[in-house]
Image (cartoon, helix red, strand yellow):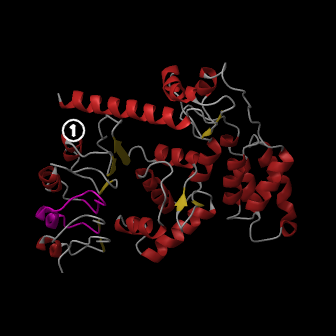
């Protein structure tokens, strides 16, 4: 009955949203931009456009998509513009800026021929030119450029998993420690705003970097290779295709649990994030069977209502945990069992209404980071 009530609630919210949207656009002209759309079926598109029919004539919808299904569904409704790749000359200009960043191309004229041959194999894709160019910038040597240029991955089309082979090639040339750091980022969803300090501390807690200053070097190295892009307010983001690559290479080690994903957590997984609206019994059951987890991070505003005892039960199982993230989860009491997690190095409890913390926290002799930001109810 609980499941039926939740379905009814979702349906009621959806109907209310339709009604609100219809009222907002009624008699008005609008421009709606939908970026990177992935439609599964016609009904999803119909659900979207029905409340928009009340708008004034002349309203427009601009949609971008990498999915051929989205194009097929809307063939009769939209003017389609199939984007072509860049010309070799334009792609060379972009590639050259990345490959010779910090130096003069004239000083490395012997590399131009090999560079232009590589560009021809990138099929006009700007992201591929940027990533491979930044990879080659690490070693401005003819043998290295020829080695990369001979890779069969540059010739392959995008696979069924949507991964550009050229991006996979750049990952293959990462040192092992940077591979671990990059793969760990798959715990966070697409379009996540990465905080450099927080991320390097998470790496440090897993002993990927050893020290925060080394973690900073690793981050800067990944950014130079276009795995991260500057965003706003000092944060960073991953291109969606780069994020797809991170998910692909980490599938045996990292797992992101959400409201839609019902599959079991593989036994090989050691790092889990829970990006869900609510922590419930079903998620508890999945997690407590994975006693060797090293990371457990809950998304901000994951509702723990009535599940504090479940959290206590879970922590009693996870003896090898190094990272525990519980930000903005509305938890007023932290279970004392947290003190049994002797390997914990990082705990994020920010923005929770704690009045006090268990004394057992003092038993965590490996703890490096305890984030209590904006826990304003704490009694000193």
Was residue 325 drawn as part of the magenta stretch in this picture? yes
User: How many discs mark residues in the rendered view?
Assistant: 1
Residue for point 43% across, 64% down: 199
Q: Nearer the viewer, residue 205 or 47?
A: 47
Residue where numbered disc 1 is placed:
282
Was residue 242 drawn as part of the magenta stretch in this picture? no
**Secondary structure beneath label 1:** helix
Say which quadrant the N terminus sits in.
top left
Q: Main secondary structure of the magenta part?
A: loop
Residue for point 54% across, 67% down: 233
- Residue 135 place in picture, x, y as percent: 66, 58
Residue for point 55% across, 30% down: 52
Range of the magenta residues?
321-346
Q: Nearer the viewer, residue 380 or 157?
A: 380
**In which quadrant of the rendered view does residue 316 lie?**
bottom left
Is 206 situated left or right of 319 in this image?
Answer: right
In the rendered image, the residue lying farthest to the bottom is 380
- Residue 371 place in picture, x, y as percent: 31, 71
Is 17 situated left or right of 3 in this image?
Answer: right
Say which quadrant the C terminus sits in.
bottom left
- Residue 323 place in picture, x, y as percent: 30, 62
In the rendered image, the residue lying farthest to the top is 76
In the rendered image, the residue lying farthest to the front is 27
46 lies above or below 243: above
Q: Nearer the viewer, residue 70 or 262?
A: 70
- Residue 175 place in picture, x, y as percent: 54, 61
- How packed mark 1 is, by other alpha carbons closer than 10 Å (few <14, some 14-19, many 20 or more), is few
Residue for point 51% across, 28% down: 51
């Amino acid at each position: 009955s609980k499941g039926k009530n939740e379905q009814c609630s979702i349906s009621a919210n959806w109907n209310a949203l339709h009604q609100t949207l219809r009222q907002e656009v009624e008699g008005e002209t609008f421009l709606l931009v939908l970026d990177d759309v992935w439609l599964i079926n016609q009904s999803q598109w119909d659900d979207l456009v029905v409340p928009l029919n009340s708008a004034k004539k002349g309203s427009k919808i601009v949609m971008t998509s990498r999915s051929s299904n989205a194009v097929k569904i809307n063939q009769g409704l939209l003017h389609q513009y199939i984007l072509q790749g860049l010309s070799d000359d334009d792609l060379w200009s972009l590639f050259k800026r990345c490959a010779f960043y910090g130096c003069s191309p004239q000083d490395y004229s012997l590399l131009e021929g090999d560079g232009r041959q590589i560009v021809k194999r990138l099929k006009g894709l700007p992201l591929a030119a940027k990533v491979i160019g930044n990879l080659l910038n690490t070693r401005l040597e003819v043998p290295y450029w020829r080695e990369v240029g001979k890779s069969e991955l540059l010739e392959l089309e995008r696979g069924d998993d949507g991964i550009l082979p050229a991006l996979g090639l750049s990952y293959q040339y990462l040192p092992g420690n940077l591979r671990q750091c990059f793969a760990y980022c798959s715990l966070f969803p697409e379009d996540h705003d990465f905080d450099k300090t927080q991320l390097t501390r998470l790496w440090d807690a897993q002993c990927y970097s050893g020290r925060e200053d080394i973690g900073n070097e690793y981050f800067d190295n990944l950014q130079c290779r276009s795995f991260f892009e500057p965003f706003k307010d000092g944060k960073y983001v991953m291109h969606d295709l780069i994020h797809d690559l991170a998910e692909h290479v980490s599938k045996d080690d990292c797992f992101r649990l959400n409201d839609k994903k019902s599959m079991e957590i593989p036994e090989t997984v050691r790092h889990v994030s829970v990006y869900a609206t609510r922590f419930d019994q079903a998620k508890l059951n999945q997690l407590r069977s994975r006693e060797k987890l090293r990371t457990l991070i809950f998304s901000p505003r994951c509702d723990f209502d009535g599940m504090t005892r479940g959290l206590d039960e879970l922590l009693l199982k996870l003896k090898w945990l190094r990272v525990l993230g519980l930000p903005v989860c509305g938890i007023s009491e932290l279970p004392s069992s947290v003190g049994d997690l002797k390997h914990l190095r990082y705990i994020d409890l920010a923005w929770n209404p704690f009045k006090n913390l268990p004394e057992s926290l003092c038993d965590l002799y490996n703890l490096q980071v305890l984030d209590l930001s904006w826990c304003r109810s704490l009694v000193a």
